[in-house]
Image (tube, helix red, strand yellow):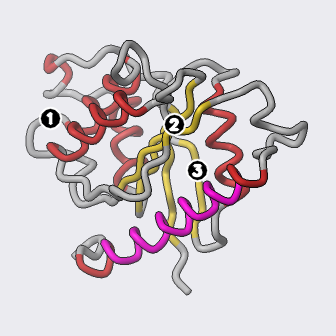
Amino acid sequence: MKTYNVGYLVGSLAMESINRKLAQALVKLAPEQLKFREISFADLPVYSYDYDADYPEPGRAFKKAIEDSDAILIVTPEYNRSIPGGLKNAIDWASRPWGTNSFAHIPSGVIGTSPGAIATAVGQQHLRSILGFLNSPQMNSPEAYIRFNDDMFNDAGEIADPSTAAFLRKYLDEFHEFVARVLTVLPRGA
């Protein structure tokens, strides 16, 4: 069975981010056909169209990392009922200059955790709107708004609760199937 290279973005730049921990736990639960690598955006300056004529190296490297991925998974917190500013900045870098949108036709998934009662539901809806505009086919179901608690991860960085681990494993199986379907219809490089 074909292997897919999945670039993942962690919406929070904090080193101890619970979403970074979730992303690392997801990698451990994923089917073997999905190979994950984090795409960092920590070095990107604040985007301005002034850069469009001469993109700086961090912007070019970020765009290339998105384009070299078969799929993108975004693991993000919700800040003020939306996505973190750093993540939006990174998406802006990848989608510019006009006509060089790196997200176009790359299948994507969205997931996140937060201690709030609705977890990351509203932030994910904003992100889905952005990804839709960028022509990134999105896995719409199952949705995954994971409510964080202090016992979510064990000492090995794995999901501690068996039912949550089973749900996330199913989410990743569905993501694998979604990526395979999309790339059958929209093959990369075609």
Left or right of 108 in this view: 15? right
Amino acid type assigned to the residue bearing label 2 in the image: Gly
> Where does the magenta region start and end?
165-182
Q: Residues within 10 Å of mark 2 (few under 14, many from 20)?
A: many
Pick out the residue farthest to the front: 117
Examine the residues drawn in magenta and state their main secondary structure.
Answer: helix
Pick out the residue farthest to the bottom: 1
Q: Which residue is mark 1?
A: 97
At a point 54% along the width and 75% down the height, the residue shown is 3
Element under disc 2 = strand
Q: Nearer the viewer, mark 1 or mark 2?
A: 2
Q: Which residue is mark 3?
A: 37
Q: Residue 66, relative to residue 53: is it above or below? A: below
Counting residues from the start of the chain, the first of labels 1 and 2 encountered is 1
Left or right of 29 in this view: 154? right
At a point 25% along the width and 43% down the height, the residue shown is 131
> Horizontal and vertical percent for residue 25?
71, 46
6, 26: nearer the viewer: 26
Q: Residues within 10 Å of mark 3 (few under 14, many from 20)?
A: some
Distance from disc 1 to disc 2, alpha carbons, whole Å, reads: 28 Å
Q: Is residue 145 magenta?
A: no
Counting residues from the start of the chain, the first of labels 1 and 3 encountered is 3
At a point 77% along the width and 25% down the height, the residue shown is 150
Distance from disc 3 to disc 2, alpha carbons, whole Å, reads: 17 Å
104, 84: nearer the viewer: 84
Q: Which residue is mark 2?
A: 112
Counting residues from the start of the chain, the first of labels 3 and 2 encountered is 3
